[in-house]
Amino acid sequence: MTYRVENSWSPEPAPGGTLTVSLHNLSDAPLAGFTLSYTAITRVMPDAPPPENAVFLKRDANYHRFAPPEGFSIPPGGSWTFRAAGLNRAPLHRGDGVKSAYVTLASGDHVDAEVGDLMRGSDRPEEPPARLPEGRLEHPFALVPWPARLDLVPGETPLALVPAEDISAEDSAALAAAGALQRRLFPAARAAVSLAPQPGTHQVAFAQDPALAPGAYRLNFAATIRLDSADADGRRHGLVALVQLLHGATAQPETFRFPATGVIEDAPRYAWRGCHLDVCRHFWPAQDVRRFLDILGWYRLNIFHWHLTDDEGWRFEVPGLPSLTTTGATRGADGPLLPQLGDPAAARTQFYTTEELRALVAHAASLGIEVVPEIDIPGHSTAMLAALPHLVDPDEPPSYSSVQGYFNNALNPAIEGTYEALGLVFDAMVAVFPSRHIHIGGDEVARDAWMASPLSRALMEREGLRGTFELQSYFLRRVKEMLTARDRVLVGWNEVAHGGGVPAKDTLLMAWENPQVGAALAREGYDVVITPGQAYYLDMAQSPAWLEPGAGWAGSSTPEQTYAYDAEASFPAELRRRFRGVQACIWCEHFHSKDYFNDLVFPRLAAIAEAAWTPLAGKDWLRFAVQARNSPRL
Ligand code: ACM
């Protein structure tokens, strides 16, 4: 490594404090005539005072570029230090500072620099607490989520589960699929399923019970285990539970046992048991998404909400709009989309081919998971607008900024080409995603968006619209009509209801800003899924400690707090029919590696899976603490 960047933060002047950045020249040549670019979520604002000992050249969202004072050169082994105040907010955790950096040499070449954690100079940083307590088990069985009712006597651990004689080809394939899931998630573990009986294996028989609810199952343990269900979901749920029981008993025999006799009667608490994944801020290749789907299946989550577009990138092919996956899917030092959030200098083009999408949708279906694709419009659209510049009002000056620091990043409701492009996008989505749900985002449009666009002003005049959110409502109503024409339900973030919203029929909104917003939306007639940032955003740090990795803007949530949160508790009983379920969200601004992903997502994803599945009375933090240690990881 030729260069290294260190950074620290001090609280003066309030409110944002000061970032001190140093560039260390580890090469054997002086460094002169260069600039330093870095990405940091703690941003230097447009009205910031000039930095000390540097010239501020550019900022675009998290991307910053500085030059040293005229004529400055760093000798080998030396460093250059500068200070920037006027920050968007005080950082909360060690990951809130410089995430990546590169030096641009006089030749124009870019050289990546190594980057350290953000240090807080003013006091001794607090250590993060342990994720899970020791816990205790009343019943020695490995099951996450915990079933609605269980009455089991522990016994010997069988060698493997095998099909009983005379079971149907379909039941046999379902048993094999549950075994294959365990093998993929735990390749080093003993196989829980075999199709060939041996001494020591335990037979599984299957029965239809039409009286059972959708997704419900009953497991009777005896010389032959009998799995009753009314439908394929119930059968799969029962098989995954069975495989979990055996996997736990073989992988951790000191903790878990397999049942000899008894019964499990189980059914999901909610129909919508979701998990969202942002693949725009950080791209997860198809094989990682596939494994993540396996993990969702293991926890009996049934909705994969795939956040496929954002300011930072467009991630799927659209016939007729090839620039979305060239320009719109590429970030790099030479633009047009600049490095963000830990990116290196070298350009990377990252998207899923249609073939990959189809394969992942089929894989999800085999696990009982519906893939709900999201395009985040009209805000969060920098990548789409970079790819399709004819969708920008040419007379609109830079006039508004999103909370993430993107200027003029919303699709313009007054440009017909916007709807034409979206028509092609929705056609592409409908061709690939069989789900009736299409998520269109609708969040975080800046308060003053479009107010300086002459085209939007003319539309407001013509339609009698007042302000940004009535324009947004006009736009989203047209989008809803486009989805209805394609027999799709509109799903969106809670701000879809702003400015008059959209018709509530066949609309599902996700309450993320706070727990109360869900009840307010239900009162307006919308169906809701609850996913509060304060408890269910798995990018939030797991404690307020400075050294804890993760974001802090929605607060922090320990695994215990995430586990304890009950979305229904504050939901009015008379509106319960609008409450569809709960969802985890994994926003990836901070997620630069799989290790990081695993540390933030587990065990909290399992905690949300239990909230989605297990009746409140069956939840037990100390029992969960033992079982959650055994989680599969990405
Ligand atoms: C969101 O977190 N902006 C939905």
Image (spheres, grey):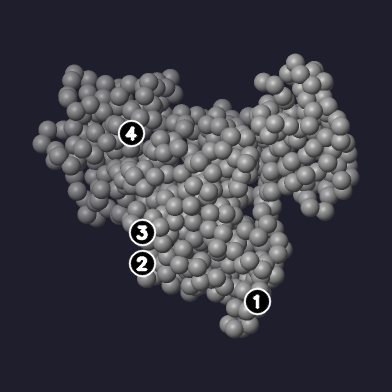
Total marks drawn? 4
Type of amino acid at the residue the image marks with label 3: Val
| Circle number at residue 457 | 1
Q: What is the spatial separation of the Cα atoms under label 2 and label 4, in whole angstroms?
A: 34 Å
Whether tag 1 and tag 3 are in contact, CB under 8 A, the answer is no
Eye-nearest disc, 4 or 3 = 3
Q: Which residue is mark 3?
A: 430
| Residue at figure coordinates x 58%, y 52% from the top left | 311
Q: Report if residue 176 is visible in the image.
A: yes
Q: Quadrant of residue 182?
A: top left
Residue 582: image location, x then y, percent = 49, 53
Q: Residues within 10 Å of mark 1 (few under 14, many from 20)?
A: some
Residue farthest to the left, as pictured: 166
Sequence order check, earlier mark of 4 and 3? 4
Side (left or right) of 112 relative to 563:
right
Type of amino acid at the residue the image marks with label 4: Leu
| Circle number at residue 176 | none
- The local secondary structure at tag 4 comes to helix
Type of amino acid at the residue the image marks with label 1: Arg
| Residue at figure coordinates x 78%, y 39% from the top left | 66
Q: Which residue is mark 2?
A: 486
Residue 301: image location, x then y, percent = 41, 46
